[in-house]
Image (cartoon, rainbow, N blue to C red):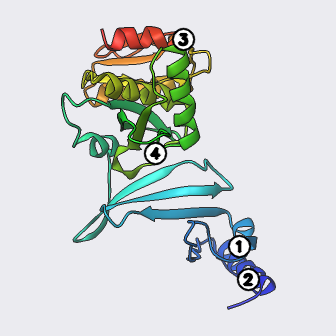
Amino acid sequence: VGSVSQIREVTGDLMQIAKTNGITVFVVGHVTKGGAIAGPKILEHMVDTVLYFEGDQHRTFRILRAVKNRFGSTNEIGIFEMKNGGLSEVANPSEIFLEERLKGATGSAVVASLEGTRPILVELQALVTPTAFGNAKRTTTGLDHNRVALLMAVLEKRAGLLLQNQDAYLKAAGGVKLDEPAIDLAIAVSLVSSYRDAETRPTDCFIGEVGLTGEIRRVNRIEQRVVEAAKLGFKRVFLPKNNLDGWMPPKDIEVVGVSTLNQALKLIFS
């Protein structure tokens, strides 16, 4: 019902019951329209773990995401699908996110992104069209708007693309949200693919952070990302040249190290 002190006392009693009996207690709460936990923040501070169970009314997938974990990683996710018999685990999320990808489509690029310690392959889509108004429009779904604007500025300055009079619409297919630096190269490739109306190979994967001077910067856990791409049948992966040292890539996938954005675009669209 009530006050902060009441929530503190009730939560304290639940914690005592859990620790005394060696059991797990779930406290189910409401969320606001903005997606945050409703009510005082004291509840989040007291509990060991905060889990968000996210879904979309237009899809059957549900994502269980840890946003606080006192004894483990905070970015792990579990993906589930709602079926007639209830929720069932999606054992290989990458296949789900890629199963409807069109062959020969422009403005599409696949990235091996990390959710916690788990690599997931996601298709990034871009649509670049001439603007009908004075100011070009930038719209993103599942991607950071500021990151996309920064990458478009880098493409304009370093790769010679005239994007200031182009509307750009980008999304991460499947409803997943991506916010790590390693998706930069895939975003840039999808933008160039749509702008030039040139398709990428359906068996290509792109990993790398793009700097403001157009360099491709090193990313973490590169080996797990490449293994996941090879597992799903990808034949070629573009990644930062500095990530090539100290590990042995799988035999059934070609690894291409690139040091600049221009070098990558020439190899991809040659």
Q: CA distance from mark 3 to mark 2?
A: 51 Å
Q: Is residue 243 visible?
A: no
Q: Residue furthest toward the front?
A: 134
Is residue 183 found left or right of 121 in the rendered image? right
Q: Residue furthest toward the left?
A: 103
Q: Tag 4: residue type? A: Thr
Do residues under tags 2 and 1 come within 8 Å of each other at their CB atoms? yes
User: What residue lies at 51% left-to-right and 56% top-to-bottom?
Assistant: 65
Q: Which residue is mark 3?
A: 246
Q: Earlier in the sequence, mark 1 or mark 4?
A: 1
User: What residue lies at 28% left-to-right and 16% top-to-bottom?
Assistant: 252
User: What residue lies at 38% left-to-right and 52% top-to-bottom?
Assistant: 175
Do residues under tags 3 and 1 come within 8 Å of each other at their CB atoms? no
| Residue 171, quarter of picture | top left
Which circle, 3 or 1, is nearer the viewer? 1
Secondary structure beneath dot 3 equals loop
Secondary structure beneath dot 2 equals helix
Q: Which residue is mark 2?
A: 7
Q: Which residue is mark 1?
A: 43
In the rendering, which numbered label is found on residue 140? 4
Secondary structure beneath dot 4 equals strand
Which circle, 4 or 2, is nearer the viewer? 4
| Residue 116, quarter of picture | top right
User: What residue lies at 70% left-to-right and 75% top-to-bottom?
Assistant: 15
Q: Residue furthest toward the right?
A: 5
